[in-house]
Image: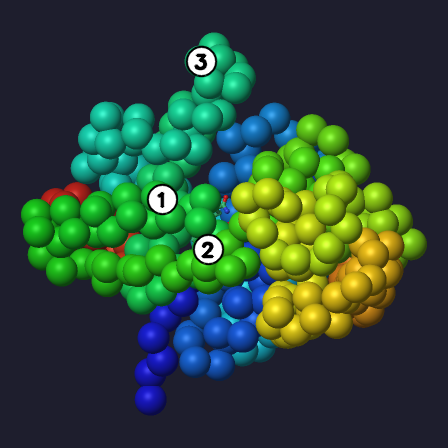
Amino acid sequence: MTRPRLYSGMQPSADSLQVGNYIGALLQWRDLQDAYEAFFSVVDLHALTQPNDPAELREKTRRTAAQYIAAGIEPSRSTLYVQSHVRAHAELAWILSTITGFGEANRMTQFKDKSARYGTDQTNVGLFTYPVLMAADILLYQTDIVPVGDDQKQHVELTRDLAERFNARYGAAFTVPIPVIQKETARIYDLQNPTAKMSKSAESDAGVLWLLDDPAVSAKKVMRAVTDSEGTVRYDRESKPGVSNLLTIYAALTGRQIPSIEDEYAGRGYGDFKKGLAEVVVNEFGPVRERALDLLADPGELDRVLASNADRAAEVADATLSDVYDRVGLLRRS
Ligand code: ATP
Ligand code: LTN
């Protein structure tokens, strides 16, 4: 029985992942590994669109991979690899860029936001073509589903358009993937600024819960999270964004429904609720952190796992790329 294919990835843009990555991505990835033949990458080529110290980028790449495994991605069951280890990604991205409209790429909101924030002089062309490389990631593996947070939906839509365009022009080379977005957890917000998405590259670290933080530090951040003056533990995204965000995190990490958590804390203050959540966070992240640090203590072994997974990925990716080269009319080297 062949299982449908799944593809997803994250940028190695920090030493640690944050709770939004964990809830919005890793928990689903872990749970989908049985039903799907899954490919998970650490997208280091994408990370180059931001300034990086080379030694730090290498370290962040390993750390990101270790956290995937620590969160339950099994490299014997799923293919977990580093994007730059499979050359086909950069090569297919080039081919796809030749069928991508300039205006089409220019409509991507992530690019518009980032270029507006930094100015066009500080914005590189790689950031502009970022979604085309992402499309190459997905299409190389004949992917059926792409589980992502809602910020990536537009990129997956572009991927679908490119796949359909290529197939119409050159014949059916690609499976057309669908994005899978879990509504309730699609967006975890910053604890200090609960209307902004929690992000690895947030300007301030006070509202970001890091997977690899010392548990005592995470507990303190939960206790200091911004709430409101009402004093009732109740979900209301509009008027109580802080408390609602904490409820979302609580529910996602325990697998409980929000109303049951509201009931548990009815008539009790935010202090109790936060204490409860701090405990949940420490219990969940403690073991993940330990596993990740164990894996990082033996980088040689981790590198070997990544290398054999990259071989597996390359087998699939090279087959797609070779078919694409033929279809567009590149002369075969004899
Ligand atoms: P960066 O700040 O470097 O862009 P990020 O923390 O926003 O990083 P990404 O590497 O862009 O995270 O995303 C990895 C995955 O985690 C994606 O599927 C993304 O949608 C998901 N994700 C990131 N932040 C959140 C969040 N706050 N809530 C839910 N999902 C998130
Ligand atoms: N752009 C994504 C990371 C990413 C990705 C992918 C996700 C790169 N290639 C392929 C899913 C499938 C991000 O920033 N979260």
Disc number for residue 120: 3
In front here: 47 or 178? Answer: 178
Q: Nearer the viewer, residue 48 or 146?
A: 146
Q: Write down the quadrant of residue 27 in the picture.
A: bottom right
Amino acid on which disc 1 is placed: His
Q: Say what secondary structure mark 1 lies in.
A: helix
Question: For disc 2, does the CB lie below 8 Å from ligand 1?
Answer: yes
Q: Is residue 213 above or below residue 117?
A: below
Local packing at callout 2 (Cα closer than 10 Å; few below 14, some 14-19, many 20+) is: many
Quarter holding the N terminus is bottom left
Left or right, residue 185 beside residue 124: right
| Residue in the picture at 74% in, 31% down | 204
Task: Give the residue type at disc 2.
Answer: Val
Answer yes or no: disc 1 within 8 Å of ligand 2: yes
Label 1 crowd bin: few (<14), some (14–19), many (20+), radius 10 Å: many
The residue pinned by badge 1 equals 155
Q: Amino acid at mark 3?
A: Thr
Q: Left of 95 or right of it: where is 200?
A: right
- Mark earlier in primary sequence (1, 2): 2
Q: Residue at x 54, y 75 (%)?
A: 31
Residue found at x 46% / y 62%: 182
Looking at the rendered structure, the secondary structure element under dot 3 is: helix
Q: Earlier in the sequence, mark 2 or mark 3?
A: 3
**Farthest residue, direction bottom:** 1
Q: What residue did someone put label 2 on?
A: 148
